[in-house]
Image (tube, rainbow, N blue to C red):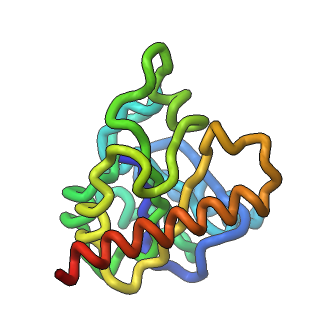
Amino acid sequence: MAAGAAGRGGGRHGGSPGGTRGPPNAAPPRRAAVAAGASYVGVGPCFSTTTKAGLPPAIGPAGIARVAAAVEVPVVAIGGIGAAEVAALDRGDVAYLQLCDAPAAPPPGMALRAESLTARLYPGEGELPLFALMDALPEDVVIDVETPVMRDRGLPAPARAALAGAAAKRFLAAWRAKKYI
């Protein structure tokens, strides 16, 4: 499932990312990224994922927590995050979620990585179990909509943002209707 969950940290999400690969206790490269101006640090894979080849083993919530303790900015856990994984986290540690939708499998002839970069769908347009993911989140989590939607790539950024916003509103209305019935 396409989602990234950010742990609470010493700042708000947004701005310049800092990402490094290495074992979860490899805080010095992450500290260097923060010293160079990163306002958050991406760390992963948190859980097993098939969207990229050649990744190190998944570090799990404990590895993410070790990195979060070593830096003063939010830590964004990436890789293999779905409803069950979010539900297993300490709810107080989840402050941010990046949400998108997609087909249950990549389109024929398209690798999963290519699909994740170019053929995502707006929330509610695909087949991912997003209601279950939303049910697993704390109520005060910040949600960002990831939108590398291929059919809209030629549109100006404000037009793509408007489409993403409208889709997100429809999705959230449908989720609320289901949740509070």
Residue appearing at x 64%, y 38% in the figure: 151
Quarter assignment of residue 83: bottom left
Residue appearing at x 21%, y 66% in the figure: 87
Residue appearing at x 68%, y 65% in the figure: 162
Q: Pick the quarter of the image with the C terminus.
A: bottom left
70 relative to 112, above or below: below
- Residue 133 image position (x, y, % from top left): 29, 62
**Image position of 154 (left or right of 172):** right
Q: Is residue 32 visible?
A: no
- Residue 144 image position (x, y, % from top left): 54, 67
- Farthest residue to the right: give it: 156
- Residue 53 image position (x, y, % from top left): 45, 25
- Residue 8 image position (x, y, % from top left): 45, 78
**Image position of 177 (left or right of 170):** left
172 relative to 59, above or below: below
Quarter assignment of residue 104: top left
Q: Is residue 30 visible?
A: yes
